[in-house]
Amino acid sequence: MFDREVYVRRRERLREILEKGVALFLGNDEAPMNYPANPYRFRQDSNFLYFFGLDEPGLAGVIDLEEEGSDILFGDDLEVEDIIWMGYLPPLREKAEKVGVKRTLPSAKLSDYLREALSRGRRVHFLHPYRGEHLLKLAYLLGIRPEAVKHWASTDLIKAVVELRSFKGPEEIQQMEVAANMTAEMHLRAMRNARAGMYERELAGEIEGLAISLGGYISFPVILTVHGEILHNHYHGNMLREGQLLLVDAGAESPMHYAGDMTRTFPVSARFTTKQREIYEVVLEAQKRAIEEIKPGVYYREVHLLAAKTMVRGLKDLGLMKGDVEEAVAAGAHALFFPHGLGHMIGLDVHDMEGLGEDYVGYDETVKRSEQFGLAYLRLAKKLQEGFTITVEPGIYFIPPLIDKWRAEGKHREFINYQKLEEYLDFGGIRIEDSVVVTEDGCRILGKPVPKDPDQVEAMRG
Ligand code: GLY
Ligand code: MN
């Protein structure tokens, strides 16, 4: 946990942005796997963590936006029966003090508090929930129907939270470094230990266990696959074979729940084949060019398009694309190979704040989401600012069903050499990803380096 002043200051800043009403943040509860007493690993809600810092179930926080220092922590002290099973935990008042909250009330009082505020004509701001239980809880607490919850959720609060959480303070950057270093260890382990004859699950389990053994957890389900062309492939049942590429997209969550996110793609054999190396170098060039371009004031949409153009240029050199580079990217032809966005914000969530709505996080009144296939998946398009932490993750994939569909439709025939593509149908996919912090005049890659230049990768694999 950070110093209490960090949380006090965050709540004060929220009060400066939103001047009227009360803001409600529900902490998460235990979520059962298969019966109530057998829960999934507990994960606190990131917004609750941001403003109230306490990493345990059964809590809620209220910030009175009109009265300084009047924040309330709702929760319950443990009974002796609970202590028998779970051990001693400090009383609610003590927990509240750790995050600078002076007032505590039992959970059972939360509904009365909120309904009274509503009856006095005060606005209760809350965020739209992403868990079904919270939808029902909010409906009960506010005395409204579950279907009405989404209409009552506060766009003003969403915007205020995005405004605050987008800028990472020095204490957060330090945590992001911790997460990135843990993430680097996971990738180094996979790159060192992958061998033909192993199953994907052996390596996936090893690096997930490593994140846990380092005191954290995974920040999202591990993607570790010889089918890198399946973008979010969570299947780990394939055997690694000589000549294949292995794509590892994995990240650790630091003990304070800041996320790491990194992707490396490397050969199962000691060396890339010529064909693999050629495509790899195109992706790497796009990633490096994008990283060079990142600085405050630049639209991330432009960086995405720069990466796309770099890839088209490289694919043209290999005979896979043709025609004018600018026109090909403007038409969206590159999306056959690069159908996703260049990156996303990262912080307490790996796709930071995505639960609040991607358009509030990655877009604003100056940049609207495109409807073009590929570009439409770009999660972050808006102007970058110092203190943003983001991922840079271009990729080139050969996705047979997509290629078949486009070829049958004759789509972008003037830019795509479908005949040459026949030689690549079993290629798979390559993605290279790092997380960076936007600095005053550029950006810095978070965490210790993990090889990505092909010679370094081969040296490690050899
Ligand atoms: N690393 C997974 C993703 O960014 O979607
Ligand atoms: Mn990512």
Image: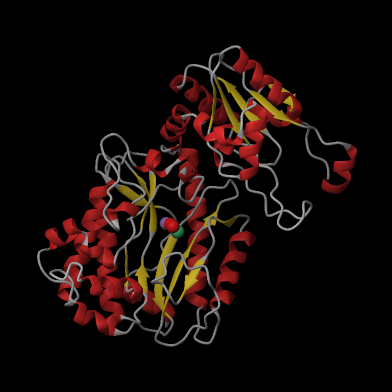
Most foreground residue, 9 or 408? 408
Q: Is residue 380 left or right of residue 202?
A: left
Question: Where residue 302 sits in the image (x, y, percent)?
Answer: 23, 49
Most foreground residue, 409 or 35? 409
Most foreground residue, 79 or 156? 156
Question: Total number of numbered labels?
Answer: 0
Seen in the picture, residue 332 relative to 357 is either above or below; the reply is below
Quarter holding the C terminus is bottom left
Q: Which residue is pictured at 34% across the width and 54% down the height?
A: 377
Quarter holding the N terminus is top right
Q: Which residue is pictured at 70% across the width and 46% down the height?
A: 30
Q: Is residue 264 left or right of residue 89?
A: left
Looking at the rendering, which quadrant does residue 289 occupy? bottom left
Quadrant in which ligand 2 is drawn: bottom left
Q: Is residue 88 left or right of residue 130?
A: right
Q: Which residue is pictured at 31% across the width and 52% down the height?
A: 376
Seen in the picture, residue 223 relative to 20 is either above or below; the reply is below
Residue 451 appears anywhere in the view: yes
